[in-house]
Amino acid sequence: MTPKPRVRQTLTTRQFAQSLGVSESSVKRWIDDGTIAADRTAGGHRRITMASAVRFMRLHRMSPQHPEVLPLTAAPSLGSVDVQTADEFYEAFVADDAARVRAIMTGRYMSGADIASMGDGLVRPALERLGELWKHDPQAILVEHRAIETCIRALTELIAWLPPIPLGAPISITAAGPDDPYLLPPMLASMVLQEEGIQVRNLGPSTPLETIDLATVRYGAIMCSLSVSTVQARHCHAAWIRLADRLGASQIRLIVGGRCVESLPNEFLSRARVCGSMIELGSYAAGVLGGVGSDRELHDGGNP
């Protein structure tokens, strides 16, 4: 199910000041000197979008003192991404408590956690534990499907809060390959790359390899990140190798990850950068943007 667009959330200067525990005059001063991006109403009143508010808090490491003031469907649960939070996140899924899931994700992001850390420290372990329920709980499939839908909706709320992509930023394709119906892994990968400053064209689940190849050409991509969450049939191995050949010839960095990545042919994997986590994907993307992945690297050895 595709999440419905969210209503644009805005705060008055008083609301934002109350949430941070600072004076309203300080917030107005930050707006006027450009520290906080804000709009003006027809009457000249300052209005701050939630996206601008969150970016300000993360940049200046100012967690809200009164998160309940913020115009969100669930008051953010502030704190770090740790084992205890992962347990709470899992229990919220089991209880089908969508509000609690959103509170944890929005709160941790406001507290400074990045998308990659939440993907590896919250989403991944929770879904792995839900997968274990299949062995003894007849409701396991129901719980897992609801958890994925809830997680997608919570992540969608965070997309608007990601830093704006610079003009002219490089482009990456993200997708799950053929017969891979999982929407969440490429969605998380696309958000991790966006957070690093890369433009993303996410093709979603069950994408034919030929379509992935066409997308890299159409959008002038320099990277292609693929998730593999289902075992790939051996009779399809030749198609995967052809994709690696075409991307390598175009000097497009090929990245692959996921729980079933080892079902891909070794000839394909030898030409790709295999990332075992979202944090590793983010680090690699940051290296590419920082100049670690040079043109010489591609000429000398294909994809790193």
Image: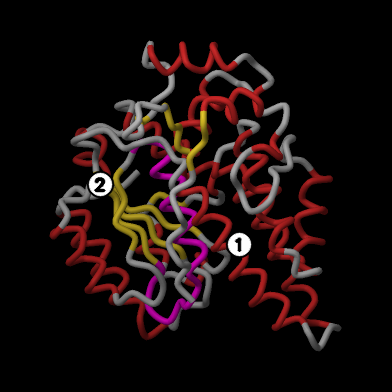
Task: Give the crowd class for mark 1: few <14, some 14-19, many >=20 residues within 10 Å.
Answer: some
Up-down relation of residue 49 to residue 145 (above or below):
above
30 to the left or right of 25: left
| Viewer-side residue, 95 vs 290 | 95
Task: Give the crowd class for mark 2: few <14, some 14-19, many >=20 residues within 10 Å.
Answer: many
Query: From which residue to which does the magenta span run?
Result: 176-197
166 to the left or right of 175: left
Instruction: Check the picture and name the quadrant holding the C terminus.
Output: top left
Residue 260, by quadrant, is bottom right
Q: Magenta span has 183?
A: yes
| Viewer-side residue, 61 vs 33 | 33
| Residue placed under numbered mark 2 in the picture | 171
| Residue placed under numbered mark 1 in the picture | 151
Q: CA distance from mark 2 to mark 1?
A: 25 Å
Residue that protrudes farthest toward the bottom in the picture: 138
Structure colour scheme:
secondary structure
Up-down relation of residue 119 to residue 34 (above or below):
below
- SS at badge 2: strand
